[in-house]
Image: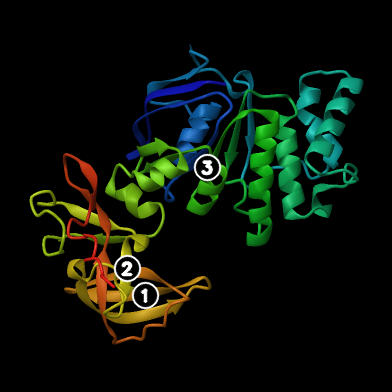
Amino acid sequence: MHIVAKHLTKSFGSFQATKDVSFEIEKGKLIGLLGPSGGGKTTILRMLAGLEVPDAGDILFHGQKVNHLPPQERGIGFVFQNYALFRHMTVFDNIAFGLTVQKRTKPQIRERVMELIVLTGLSGLEHRLPNQLSGGQRQRVAFARAIAPEPQLLLLDEPFAAIDAKVRKELRTWLKDMIDRVGITTIFVTHDQEEAVEVADQIMIVNQGRLEQQGTPIEIYREPQTPFVATFIGESNRLDDISGLKGFDSEAIHQAKAVIRPEFIEIGHPGEISFPSAAEQGRVRNIFFRGTNWQVEVEVEGDRLFAYRSMELPPLQPGDEVHVLIHRLYVFNENENRLLENRLKVDPMPVHI
């Protein structure tokens, strides 16, 4: 299903849940609707499902306006955070529910349900009740029930929130594989950025009722359009005044705020830094073991920054005087956002032997 949303606005009393939200979703895409709690994600999902009617704006499915079309006529499958399985029904009967409502024949129902039981890895569990299943198995049943009537759009509201971390990681891969197989346009709400980046073809970031940015995970990470996106996706340092940093054009960063990814920063003892003339002087405040690397907190001109340091290098200690090279940073002001490179980084003088 091809989806277009135009200027969606929705309020609940004095609270404005969405503000002039517009987007387009291509058929067959898996979209992660990402943002902090209360940002408007679930409201957008419920408007698409027909569970809420927008106060203003339009929703179009395949070019047809569906604002006031009831949920059962929209061709949508919905998977709720708490699964919402029928406790008195077996796995088979839960999956068959939508097909029964469609008044399909018993042979048609059985064929479709058994196909989905195999597809979702539930073989041998079809006669069990929901309370006899694990959380991951119940989520698979909910997914199978939602896609059984062959909807054109699948909506998932925080589908992995009630599942423990290990199973959640396994289900992410499973979900992406299932969506690729069945080819349904899918939107899932999450507040977990790792989940969205790993699973989604595209991410839509919503904050305070507004759509901040839409794009592929790589585009969102490498080309953030707003300070919020830059700080929400991935780890980052945010500075309000960067006029004193070496290597960055003072005119370009006038009255601009900066976001610096930890991987943009190189920290080391004198002699370890690749371009020492472009480096700041800093002092290590804290160092944390992160398994594959060290996370180093360093103070530079009164600001605290954190960066990563390879486990292959000698460890730093709190109190160490270090060089801090900022290779690049994002700058944002009212008119633009840019990625700036440190202009003092030059090739070192060749060594003649």
Looking at the picture, the colour scheme in use is rainbow
The residue drawn where x is 75% and y is 36% is 144
Label 2 SS = strand
- The x, y position of residue 15, in whole percent, is 34, 41
Q: Which numbered disc flags the more N-terminal residue, 3 or 1?
A: 3
- Judge from the rendering whether residue 39 lies leftward or rightward of residue 68; answer left or right: left
Q: Residue furthest front?
A: 353
Q: Of 346 and 85, which appears nearest the observer?
A: 346
Q: Which residue is mark 1?
A: 296
Q: Position of residue 333 (x, y in %)?
A: 17, 46
Left/right of residue 157 with respect to residue 67 in the rendered view: right
Q: Badge 2, how many Cα within 10 Å: few under 14, some, many 20+?
A: many
Which of the two discs, 2 and 1, labels the residue nearer the N terminus?
2
Report, in whole angstroms, how far the alpha carbon at label 2 lies from the one at label 1.
10 Å
> What residue is at 54 percent from the left and 26 percent from the top?
50
Is 230 left or right of 113, judged from the image as shown? left
* Mark toward the start of the polypeptide (3 vs 2): 3
Q: Nearer the viewer, residue 207 or 118?
A: 118
- Residue holding disc 2: 266
Q: Residue furthest top?
A: 64
Mark in front: 3 vs 1: 1
Other residues around mark 1 within 10 Å, as few (<14) / some (14–19) / many (≥20) = many
Q: Amino acid at mark 1?
A: Val
Residue 183: in sight, yes or no? Answer: yes
